[in-house]
Image: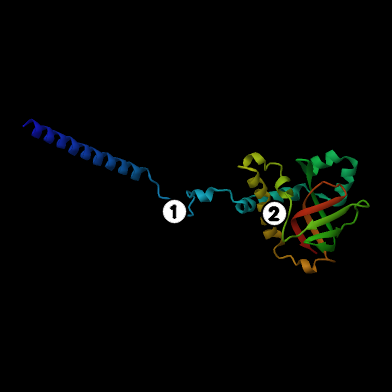
C-alpha cells in the first residue's frame, strides 16, 4: 500500500507540473502577442527607413541653402575689392568660417572659357588682375561648400564622420539634379552665364565655385 500511494502521489505532482508549465507557456505567448507590433515594410515604423539617407537629406536642405546663398552673395568684383581691403569683414558679410578655410557666397556674369572634367573657367569683368573664377558643372560635384555655407550643419548632428561627409554629397547631388540636369556642357564654352554659388577661399585669387543657380544668357 505504501508503495502504491507514493506512486500515485508522484504521478499527481508530475501532472500538476505539466499543467503549470502549459499555463505559464500560454500566459507568455499571450503577453508576447499583445506586445508584438506588426511593422509594414517601407512604413515610418520600419527602422530601415530611419537610417540616414544622404539624398533625402540633400533634397530637404538644398532649397534653404540656395536661398541663403542667393541672399548673401556679393558680386564678384565687389567681393574681390572688399577681400583686398578687409578680408575678415568681407568673410563676415558674405561667408562662413568653416574649419580651416572660409566659405563665401558670390554672384557673377561672364563668358565661359575652356573646360575640363566639368570645370569651366569664366571670364568676369572687373576682377583684379590675376584673379580667376572657375565653376564646376558636374556630372560629379565635389567639395562641401554647400553643406558648410549655412554654418549650422554641424558634425555633432550626425552619427559619425561618414554620415557627415555623405550629407555634403547628398546636398551636391540635390543641387545637380535641380540646377545642372539639363546643362549641355559640350556647347557651354563661349556662352555667357550668370552664376550664384559658393567657394572655399583656399587661394584668394583662384575661386572654384559650386553653383546654386546657373543661367545661360
> Mark 2 or 1 closer to N-term?
1
User: Outermost residue, bottom direction?
Assistant: 187
For the residues labelled 2 and 1, say whether their Cβ atoms are less than 8 Å apart: no
Q: Nearer the viewer, residue 97 or 30?
A: 30
Q: Residues within 10 Å of mark 1 (few under 14, many from 20)?
A: few
| Picture coordinates of residue 75, whole percent (x, y) | 83, 51
Q: Can you say whether 207 is above or below 184 in the image? A: above
Residue closest to the far top: 2
Residue at (22% x, 40% y) in the render: 18
> Which quadrant of the view contains residue 110?
bottom right
Q: CA distance from mark 2 to mark 1?
A: 32 Å
Q: Residue at x 12, y 32 (%)?
A: 6
Residue 210: quadrant of the picture: bottom right
Tell me the SS state at disc 1. Answer: loop
Question: Mark 2: which secondary structure?
Answer: helix
State the image quarter where residue 117 is shown.
Answer: bottom right
**Residue 173: image x %, image y %?**
67, 56
Q: Which mark is residue 129?
A: none
* Position of residue 128 measured from the top left corner of the image (x, y, whole percent): 92, 51
Disc 2 target residue: 172
Whether residue 77 sits left or right of residue 152 in the image: it is: right
- Residue at 75%, 40% in the rendered image: 99
Within 10 angstroms of label 2, few (less than 14), some, or many (20 or more) residues?
Answer: many
Q: Residue furthest right?
A: 129
Residue situated in front as seen by the camera: 135 or 25:
25
Horizontal relation, residue 6 to residue 153: left or right: left
Image quarter (top left, top right, bottom left or bottom right) of the N terminus: top left
Q: Which mark is residue 40?
A: 1
Which image quarter is the C terminus in? bottom right
Amino acid at each position: 500500500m505504501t508503495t502504491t500511494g507514493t506512486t500515485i502521489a508522484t504521478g499527481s505532482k508530475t501532472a500538476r507540473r505539466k499543467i503549470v508549465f502549459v499555463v505559464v507557456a500560454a500566459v507568455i505567448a499571450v503577453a508576447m502577442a499583445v506586445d508584438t507590433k506588426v511593422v509594414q515594410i517601407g512604413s515610418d515604423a520600419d527602422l530601415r527607413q530611419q537610417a540616414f539617407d544622404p539624398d533625402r537629406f540633400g533634397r530637404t536642405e538644398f532649397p534653404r541653402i540656395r536661398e541663403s546663398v542667393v541672399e548673401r552673395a556679393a558680386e564678384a568684383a565687389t567681393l574681390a575689392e572688399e577681400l583686398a581691403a578687409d578680408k575678415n569683414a568681407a568673410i563676415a558679410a558674405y561667408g562662413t568660417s568653416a574649419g580651416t578655410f572660409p566659405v563665401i557666397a558670390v554672384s557673377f556674369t561672364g563668358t565661359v572659357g575652356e573646360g575640363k572634367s566639368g570645370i569651366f573657367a569664366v571670364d568676369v569683368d572687373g576682377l583684379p588682375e590675376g584673379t580667376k573664377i572657375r565653376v564646376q558643372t558636374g556630372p560629379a560635384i565635389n567639395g562641401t561648400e554647400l553643406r558648410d555655407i549655412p554654418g549650422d550643419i554641424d558634425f555633432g548632428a550626425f552619427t559619425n564622420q561618414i554620415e557627415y561627409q555623405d550629407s555634403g554629397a547628398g546636398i551636391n547631388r540635390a543641387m545637380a539634379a535641380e540646377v545642372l540636369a539639363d546643362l549641355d556642357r559640350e556647347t557651354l564654352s563661349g556662352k555667357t552665364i550668370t552664376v550664384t554659388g559658393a567657394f572655399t577661399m583656399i587661394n584668394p585669387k583662384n575661386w572654384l565655385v559650386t553653383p546654386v543657380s546657373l543661367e545661360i544668357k
